[in-house]
Image (cartoon, rainbow, N blue to C red):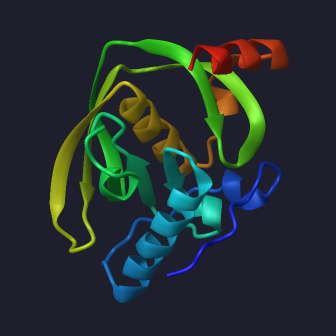
């Protein structure tokens, strides 16, 4: 397992559509393991394969509602994820490991149901709520070459970011 370099805005890879995974191979499992290490090292809540230079429909999302689990245990691996259903609405600050230091105000669903495959190639469905729902949408957007900035109603100022960090 290895840490991978996270690409940043301006890299054309982040603007491309990803290909579906047709078979879960050892190569895909190595990608998942490397992405897991990279995500845990980054302090983020999600990571998509194109962010590490791989144009495949693979994402990892932290289930932040599982506070009793370690960060490694919170990671949900999603291969070929698709959003099936959404409920409600939330609006709040959103950032991205590929757009360091920039946060925007983004509207996302409050709850999201996703269908994907796991590392064994088995299909499953899962609901995410709050930050996890936001991360599902954000990471799946990456698979279609979309950055959160395209959904942002405005970029937060340094003063607003500082005020938000003081609340935490």
Q: Residue at x 51, y 13 (%)?
A: 91
Tell me the quarter of the image containing the C terminus: top right
Q: Is residue 93 above or below residue 99?
A: above
Q: Is residue 59 above or below residue 142?
A: below
The quadrant in which residue 66 appears is top left
Residue 150 place in picture, x, y as percent: 67, 29
> Residue 153 vs residue 129: left or right?
right
The quadrant in which residue 52 appears is bottom right
The quadrant in which residue 42 appears is bottom right
Q: How many numbered markers are drawn?
A: 0
Q: Residue at x 22, y 71 (%)?
A: 121
> Residue 54 vs residue 33: left or right?
right
Q: Residue at x 66, y 16 (%)?
A: 166
Q: Is residue 69 visible?
A: yes
Q: Is residue 155 visible?
A: no
Residue 72 place in picture, x, y as percent: 37, 58
The residue closer to the viewer here, 92 or 19, is: 92
Q: Residue furthest bottom?
A: 26
């Amino acid at each position: 397992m290895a840490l991978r370099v996270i690409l940043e805005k301006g890299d054309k890879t982040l603007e491309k559509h990803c290909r579906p995974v047709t078979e879960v191979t050892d190569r895909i499992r190595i990608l998942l393991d490397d992405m897991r290490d990279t995500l845990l090292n980054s302090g983020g809540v999600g990571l998509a394969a194109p962010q590490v230079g791989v144009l495949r429909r693979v994402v990892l999302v932290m289930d932040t509602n599982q506070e009793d689990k370690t960060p490694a245990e919170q990671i949900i691996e999603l291969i070929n994820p698709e959003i099936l259903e959404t409920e409600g609405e939330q609006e709040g600050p959103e950032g991205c490991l590929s757009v360091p230091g920039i946060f925007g105000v983004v509207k996302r669903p409050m709850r999201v149901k996703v269908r994907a495959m796991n590392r064994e190639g088995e299909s499953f469905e899962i609901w995410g709520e709050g930050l996890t729902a936001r991360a599902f949408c954000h990471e799946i957007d990456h698979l279609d070459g979309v950055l959160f900035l395209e959904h942002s109603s405005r970029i937060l100022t340094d003063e607003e970011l500082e005020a938000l960090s003081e609340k935490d």
